[in-house]
Amino acid sequence: SGRVVQRLGEPAFYRDSGCPAISPFGREAAVSILNPQNGRSDIWLVDLERGGRQPFTTGTSDKYIAAWTRDGTSVVYQSRPDGPPHVDVIARARSGADEQLLARLPGFVAPTSISGDGRWLLLEEFGTGSDVLVVDTSRRGAEPAVLIGGASFDYLATFSPDGQYVAYASD
């Protein structure tokens, strides 16, 4: 109907529409909010039940495009501490623990899903098209491999609840 049901906090400058990632239990969303003073974005957690929000990341590097772990205890996100040509993929516990570097990758990639055991990370690689990559986070410095690629635009990959399959969108 187009009727406003609930407002989720105050208006903000959302980076790339905020790239909302809904937590597995549907109570929170991780969104990217741009700071107009410094031009950098951070991940914020929005309480979908009460409507408030709080910063999840801070600092000087750009942080955006997040995905939740299957159990909802951590958020994985993209960070560009030094700008191009590298992207860091970071995991941080919902409790606010220190950041854990999962991968440092060339180009522009974004996390889309992480397996239930936390080992496998799906990434979307942007370039002339879009490929789905997979990286083994248990191996330090592991290189991502193309899981789904080619001439098509493949995106929004996610692991099935049992971790046996990957669903994705494609043109």
Image (spheres, grey):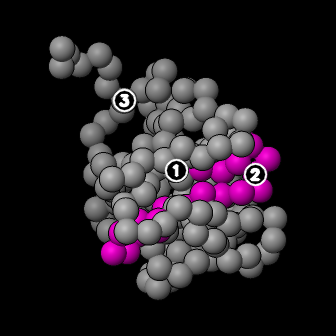
**Earlier along the polypeptide chain: callout 2 or callout 1?**
2
- Residue drawn where x is 37% and y is 68% of the image: 151
Q: CA distance from mark 3 to mark 2?
A: 30 Å
Residue type, label 1: Ala
Q: Which mark is residue 157?
A: 1
Q: In the orientation shown, which residue stands out farthest toward the left?
A: 2
When asked about the image quadrant of residue 141, the answer is: bottom right
Visible residue check, residue 27:
yes
Residue 165 location, x and y as percent? 65, 43
Residue 51 lies, with reference to residue 5, above or below; the image says below
Q: Which residue is mark 3?
A: 8
- Residue drawn where x is 23% and y is 19% of the image: 4
* Left or right: 80 in relation to 166: left
Secondary structure of the residue carrying numbered label 1: strand
Secondary structure of the residue carrying numbered label 3: loop
Secondary structure of the residue carrying numbered label 2: loop
Residue type, label 2: Gly
Nearest-to-viewer mark from 3 and 2: 2
- Residue drawn where x is 68% and y is 39% of the image: 70
Q: In the image, which residues are magenta?
A: 113-131
Residue type, label 3: Leu
Q: Nearer the viewer, residue 11 or 131?
A: 131
Residue 124 location, x and y as percent? 49, 62
When asked about the image quadrant of residue 7, the answer is: top left
**Earlier along the polypeptide chain: callout 1 or callout 3?**
3
The quadrant of the picture occupied by the N terminus is top left
- Pointer 3 and pointer 2: residues touching (CB < 8 Å)? no
Q: Which mark is residue 118?
A: 2
Residue 61 location, x and y as percent? 49, 72
